[in-house]
Image (spheres, helix red, strand yellow):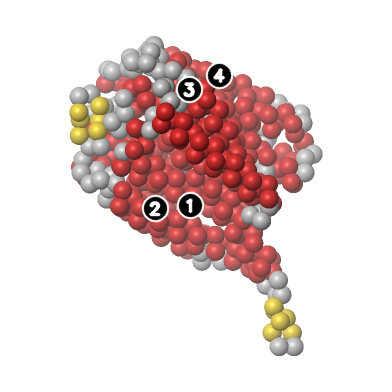
Amino acid sequence: MDNIATSHARRWWVLMTVSVSQLMVALDSTVINIALPRAQVDLNFSVANRQWLITAYALSFGSLMLLGGRLSDLWGRRASLMVGLVGFALASAVGGAARNFAALVCARAVQGAFGALLAPAALAALTLTFREPRERATAFSIFGAVGGSGAAIGLLLGGALTQWASWRWCLTINLFFAALSMVGVILFVERGRGERAVHLDLVGTVLASAGLFALVFGLGHAVTTGWGNFDTWFSLGVGAVLLVVFVLWQRRSAHPLLPLRIVKDRTRGGSLIALFFTNIGIFSISLFLAYYLQNTLGYSPMKTGLLFLPLVAALAFSASLASARLLALVGPRPLVPVGMLLGMMGMILFTKLPAHADYLGHVMPGLIVTGLGLGLIYAPSTATATAGIEPRDAGAASAMVSTAQQIGGSVGIATLNTIAVITSRRALACRPTGATSTCASAVAATLHGYAVAFWWAAGFFGVGALVTLLLLESGVPELEGDLIVP
């Protein structure tokens, strides 16, 4: 078992260390978004190829997550964190210095691969460090707030760096985060051996990685080609078949990559579903609002990032105060469904975005309501999804949390973006009205596409509220031995 730091003061330094790592991984999914136009000019790549800078990161991250979690169990948290940080930093440096499109795409893919090792190792270290229920709730509230606001912070940071320095700093800045986190790992995460009972399931690794790769690739392919493309559905079909075979193999494997006992628990399954649906919905905020604020209202990248601060502040307040106190008192069941309903309300508020600048009246209320909801979802769901886990399975369970979020984000990208684009195109089509025809303006058509996508996002949050209400169990987590059992 990893001998994670146990002294009171050191525990909180461990939390700070893994939170910085989590922030770096989370914000890298969006930090480059605002920088893409200037990177495209510098490296001279096409609009069609632009999406691969996002997809390459998601592909390697999503497909290697389960392997990264098991390697964390095998090597130990400290070693996994150090390898992940060094690899992520080197890939970021190469990307920041890239002189052509191919080098930049490869760097993003390598970033995702090391992120797949880093994310579950960070969460596993936190899981094994905090065992007392109230401290655990507080720690996971802070960790959840950092992870949940990572996308918005990425937009803010990307806007600032792109406007004041260079798009290359959107990647190079990771050297600072990695160095800061590395110091924390060296000083506060004690040396520990990997679990001797853990063995690497090679067949399961190939099936899971290939299945998740095909699934994420298919979803990413749908963004640019639409849902009617054969390659999209072929990739999704192959991914689904491989994942079914993977589950069947895990039932008979002597050393499974993902022990099925991890996902059979009712509360844990509900928590993973909550994270999945939440990341589908949260995508609409980070993408559509960024485009709306820049392209429709004409705000600069820096101002766009700053305008996301109410979301970050509301999420941090909700997670660090409300969830930290309430989770240990009432358990996850009332918190997560209520958070889902708040997320749904926020999405509905965004369906009324006007063509003229009215941030205080139409944007900020939705950001605040959604942020309050996300704080009630991320912290309790992350805490309960990893509660009651044996140390030898901590990495695998943590990988499931990251996988649920990553796949949810990919589904959101493919589904909501396709809905918005198709709806906008239909709105642009002129309709005959008597002797004349009525044509919507490009701005009106775009806003209509956003509105429909936000309604779908609201629907996802609504389904998530119903499912989590049915699956999550009532009651406060209790200690059994030295493990927390939901």
The residue to which callout 1 is attached is 281
Viewer-nearest of labels 2 and 1? 2
Identified by mark 1, the residue type is Gly
Q: Is residue 207 above or below residue 346?
A: above
Along the line of sight, the residue nearer the viewer: 474 or 32: 474
Q: CA distance from mark 3 to mark 2?
A: 32 Å
The residue to which callout 2 is attached is 464
The residue to which callout 4 is attached is 86
Residue 56: x and y, percent? 64, 35
Identity of the residue furthest to the front in this view: 252
Identified by mark 4, the residue type is Val
Q: Residues within 10 Å of mark 1 (few under 14, many from 20)?
A: many
Viewer-nearest of labels 1 and 3? 3
The answer to whether residue 190 is left or right of residue 171 is: left
**Residue located 54% across and 48% down the image:** 411
**Residue located 29% across and 46% down the image:** 472
Q: Residues within 10 Å of mark 3 (few under 14, many from 20)?
A: some
**Residues tagged 2 and 1 counted as in contact (Cβ below 8 A):** yes
**Residue located 34% across and 38% down the image:** 264
Question: Mark 2 or mark 4, which has the lower sequence index?
Answer: 4
Question: Mark 4 or mark 3, which has the lower sequence index?
Answer: 4
Residue 443: x and y, percent? 65, 65
The answer to whether residue 34 is left or right of residue 335 is: right
Identity of the residue furthest to the right in this view: 44
